[in-house]
Amino acid sequence: MVRYRRGMEILNRINRESYSALREELEDVAPDLARFVAEFAYGDIYSRGVLDLKTRELLTLAALTVLGAEDQLKSHVRGALNAGCSEEEIIEVMIQMAVYAGFPAAINGVLAAKEVFMEKK
Amino acid sequence: MVRYRRGMEILNRINRESYSALREELEDVAPDLARFVAEFAYGDIYSRGVLDLKTRELLTLAALTVLGAEDQLKSHVRGALNAGCSEEEIIEVMIQMAVYAGFPAAINGVLAAKEVFMEKK
Amino acid sequence: MVRYRRGMEILNRINRESYSALREELEDVAPDLARFVAEFAYGDIYSRGVLDLKTRELLTLAALTVLGAEDQLKSHVRGALNAGCSEEEIIEVMIQMAVYAGFPAAINGVLAAKEVFMEKK
Amino acid sequence: MVRYRRGMEILNRINRESYSALREELEDVAPDLARFVAEFAYGDIYSRGVLDLKTRELLTLAALTVLGAEDQLKSHVRGALNAGCSEEEIIEVMIQMAVYAGFPAAINGVLAAKEVFMEKK
Amino acid sequence: MVRYRRGMEILNRINRESYSALREELEDVAPDLARFVAEFAYGDIYSRGVLDLKTRELLTLAALTVLGAEDQLKSHVRGALNAGCSEEEIIEVMIQMAVYAGFPAAINGVLAAKEVFMEKK
Amino acid sequence: MVRYRRGMEILNRINRESYSALREELEDVAPDLARFVAEFAYGDIYSRGVLDLKTRELLTLAALTVLGAEDQLKSHVRGALNAGCSEEEIIEVMIQMAVYAGFPAAINGVLAAKEVFMEKK
């Protein structure tokens, strides 16, 4: 329970709505997978310190841009904003990914971020 | 020439030896590719500001861990150290990648970093 | 013709509708590609024995979850059900993929499976 | 400016509309990324000679089919047609990718190409 | 502690030596990553039932063949043998991956398995 | 048998030694996989016409550079040379891949090609 609570604390700060939505979607097919997100991803990993949450969210954006995981990318663009990243910093991550994963990944990353920025306006 | 010089300035600060080695290796087959690294990757991208070099190196480690690009990963572990990242921070990036790209990517990333740490000791 | 017939026999048992749909879609641009699916994928590979069809479908779900190939994943969720896999077993494959390809791949896999399960209800 | 102009010359010949659309989409979030496409991808790379534009477009189709980058793939199917590739040659690239990246990538590539072919008719 | 013990129980049955080697390698740089393997991968996931260990090992081979993660693949070929899979079944997984991830992935998977088979003889 | 013979004819022209080596390596674990390479990859695909062998080899280099499949890449660098591609053209493919798959893939591709070029000298 400690891991879950520790994870939920971080999730509530930076990704509350995305996580609620995920939990609801997974509820009737794979509720444990949602639990693992809270316990392992957030309770075990994001809570480790060493790197602050803002840096962790930027790293996650880099990873998801490389992987082309659009839905998770949008959810973490929201998370990054909530963790205190600016829109400019978020876009900068995607632009840098052009060097390592090519232009299609970078462009798709920027367009996903743009969609999130616009729904906030 | 401005882009090249701007790129070399950053490369000289954080990745001088790796870049010399790369330039030498590419010299007789693809010298332009080495030039593009200096001009585009460093002269156009790393020099943009918005994110500091330390953060940029951590993002690059995230990308290369996801991609499993071992040689480039080792070279950027050196770059990250030169940019002021601690060994702990570097390892932390790789551990976080377990969440997004799975354990094999994270483990291979940590072992690549370890090799670099050990050659420095 | 033997390979094609052998492939179609398996396809008719586990993936008849998906394959008809595919053949129709490819008919005017790449009919040979649909033929290769029947001849090579099913006639040469799935028909080899050693592993039963149920196991083969689970392996395919693992591969497609890692690759993030959503359309093919949905088609093979149907195939897996037709081959005798339970919904629980299918979901379990996706959850296991979190370990090897990360949470985004696993979550996207589960959501794709859920869509197929729901259209059957 | 030379690189930009050189890139735009090629873009105007083979991918004018896709590039305008991209530039517009990126304008308010990452205008530099659109500029890098013109300067680096087209001004530095496509303009190098050695391979003609037709061959370069086919190579790009191969890469994007392997990567599964659907939007960029469609844009380059248009580019390939404008560079003088036939529909048959384009489809042939995707079919060959079945050998190296598997059937899902090949099938998704063919279906993306088909969509572009049909909007032209 | 329950999760760790539950994970170690499975690891001791099917992958004891690989896990000891991993734990030792990670000890001085990322001991927590080794712990997460036992707790999360084995304690949370492999222990879930629904699929037996033999099937789980085959699924893991499929994933690692697609990902091209050679070291982990070899370790899980050993795990699969210990879980009761035959050499033939293991090879069959790799061959099937030619359909979904292409021939290079399948061939590299077979050659990795062959190395493990030969060190046992 | 027709497909096999048709495939072997092409293999004998452009990749004879690589294929012999592969067949020998796979002989005692997965001889059918070597047969599928001849029958399907070469007998069904490379023999289709529409694109000439030189273009097909360049496309394969693009795919393998993106995938990072080093051993297969080296083998196809040899194949490309045998099919009449120049060293310059081969390198040019890899450089172009920097745009779509990033610099690490392009650099690793160039270095693999260089190794093959040097063993010929």
Image (cartoon, coloured by chain):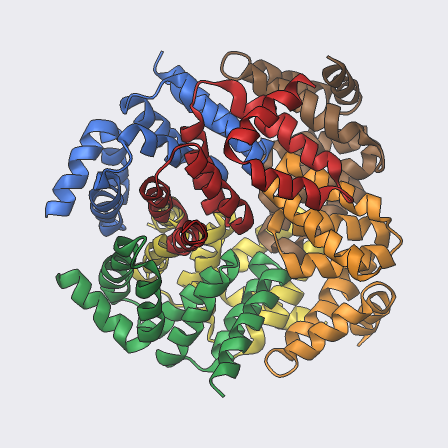
Chain colours: A blue, B red, C yellow, D brown, E green, F orange
Location of residue A76 with respect to E76 vertically, above or below:
above
> For the point 47% across and 64% down, which residue is it?
E71
- Is residue A21 found left or right of C76 in the rendered image? left
> For the point 30% across and 56% down, which residue is it?
E28
> For the point 48% across and 58% down, which residue is it?
C63
Nearest the viewer among B20 and D96 is B20
- Is residue E27 found left or right of D80 in the rendered image? left
Nearest the viewer among C31 and F101 is F101
Q: Which residue lies furthest to the front in this view?
A: B121
Would residue C107 be seen by someone viewing this image from the given angle?
A: no
* Number of marks drawn: 0
- Is residue A112 found left or right of C103 in the rendered image? right
Q: Residue A36: give x, y in percent of width and height.
A: 24, 49
Q: In which quarter of the image is the N terminus of chain D?
A: top right
Location of residue A63 with respect to B47 vertically, above or below:
below
> For the point 56% across and 30% down, which residue is it?
B12
Q: Which residue lies furthest to the bottom in this view?
A: E121
Location of residue B1 with respect to F44 vertically, above or below:
above
Q: In which quarter of the image is the C terminus of chain D?
A: top right
Q: Give the image quarter of residue F8.
A: bottom right
Nearest the viewer among E109 and B96 is B96
Q: Residue E54: give x, y in percent of width and height.
A: 36, 74
Q: Residue A2: give x, y in percent of width and height.
A: 10, 46
Q: Residue F37: give x, y in percent of width and height.
A: 71, 68
